Image (spheres, helix red, strand yellow):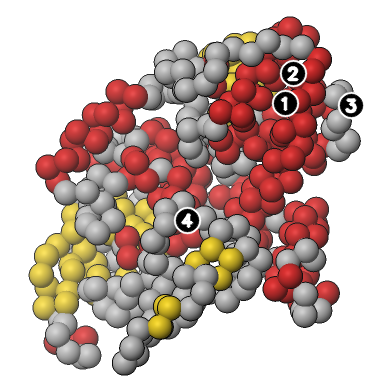
Amino acid sequence: MVAAHTSSHPSASAGWIICLDKRPTERSREDVDVILARLQNLKAFERFHPSVLQQICMRGFYEYLERGITLYRQGDIGTSWYAVLSGSLDVKVSETANHQDAVTICTLGAGTAFGESVLDDRPRPATIVTRETSELLRLGQTDFRCLWGNYHQYMAGLLPPPYGVMENSRSNDRKSAADSEPTNALHSFYKVPSENVLRAGKVLHKAILARAPHMIRDRKFHLKTYRRCCVGIELVDWQMQQSCVHSRSQAVGMWQALLEEGVLNLMDQELSFQDKYVFYRFLGDEQDAPAPPGDGDPKEGPDELQEALGLLAQLGPDAHLRMVLRKRPSERTADDLEIIYEELLHIKALSHLSITVKRELSGVLIFESHANAGTVLFSQGEEGTSWYIILKGSVNVVIYGKVGVSFPSVSDSDSD
């Protein structure tokens, strides 16, 4: 049984709890700041990188549990990850199928976190019962997986093996992360940029400085100053003035391509480019960021600008599609659904499906990326939880019986 939050707790009227009780989509920037100010002073989050903590403030939920409440049982498939804000919980394990035979092996106190098995859908290894009145912060499975995927380098030292690193290397990891990025810096969520995209970003950066220098300047928001930032809606407006850009949706996709490569960095909100009053900063304006490998500052001229815009116009549709697929299905707009549907129309493996089925799929598909060869999506004998469409790349299908059989690779646009 999972206990829901109740307002009987004496601190339930605290502002940060009221903010956490709101749906993530309804939380304002002020709400996130209130939650962040509170969590920064709690032991449970003292080792978390500022960028990770910011995302937790945006997506976490507050839970208040009375003594003796069973949060989940051994063998359950988890749906959430938890951090203990106050109180304590007993960890109980049974060697039989009878939960009454479970014995307490340890107690989780304030400052501990648990539930990381949601990363790979493993059954819960133990039963968790509150030892006393406790306060928890809960993060849903989808959000925790997204957090892990985007901030793995900062979270590896916070989780136990096999997800995290061993204790003796954690301090070095935290030190190197802290040394490499200042607390208030704009962070890249993705990867080291490729040479051609980096060059395109430099060309656009120089073009804006030459033609609309007012767009890149210091800006103040909630008593904070953000150095050399530009605004999402102004970037889209500027793109719309270029001859090869025909819609705001196309412009969003082009900026998203730069965002995914880390050439354009966002402040602290969603992992997608927004045509709104949201701050972004070009990589070249990062004061403390080392210059990535490249071919030097390109000359900005009509030909170079058109070449850069042409490249981004090619990359934009795929980047926009990935951005839409990363959204929760409940957050997708009608335009988002249409973008996914149009992509499904061109996938050969789905040609036999009706229009109605494809439109239904548009509302439930979720983007998943695996950068490393050899990643196991699932193993033979496991209970299936997902159906896949391969947009790019290939997978090997191996069936083990009396004799191992390896099928030919399943590649782009196939489904399984």
Q: Residue at x 28, y 56 (%)?
A: 163
Q: Are marks 4 and 2 in contact (CB under 8 Å)?
A: no
In this rendering, would 372 be left or right of 124?
right
The quarter in which the N terminus is drawn is bottom left
Cα separation between marks 4 and 1: 28 Å
Residue 153 x, y percent position in the rendering: 34, 41
Tag of residue 243: 3
Q: Would you place residue 38 above or below residue 21 in this image?
A: above
- Badge 1 amino acid: Ala
Q: Which mark is residue 370?
A: 4
Q: Secondary structure at mark 2?
A: helix
Residue plotted at (24% across, 36% down): 173
Disc 2: which residue = 304
Between label 1 and label 3, give the one nearer the viewer. Answer: 1
* Label 2 to label 3: alpha-carbon separation: 14 Å
Would you call the spot at circle 1 few (<14 residues within 10 Å), some (14-19), or many (20 or more)?
A: many
Between the residue at mark 2 and the residue at mark 1, the CA separation in whole angstroms equals 6 Å
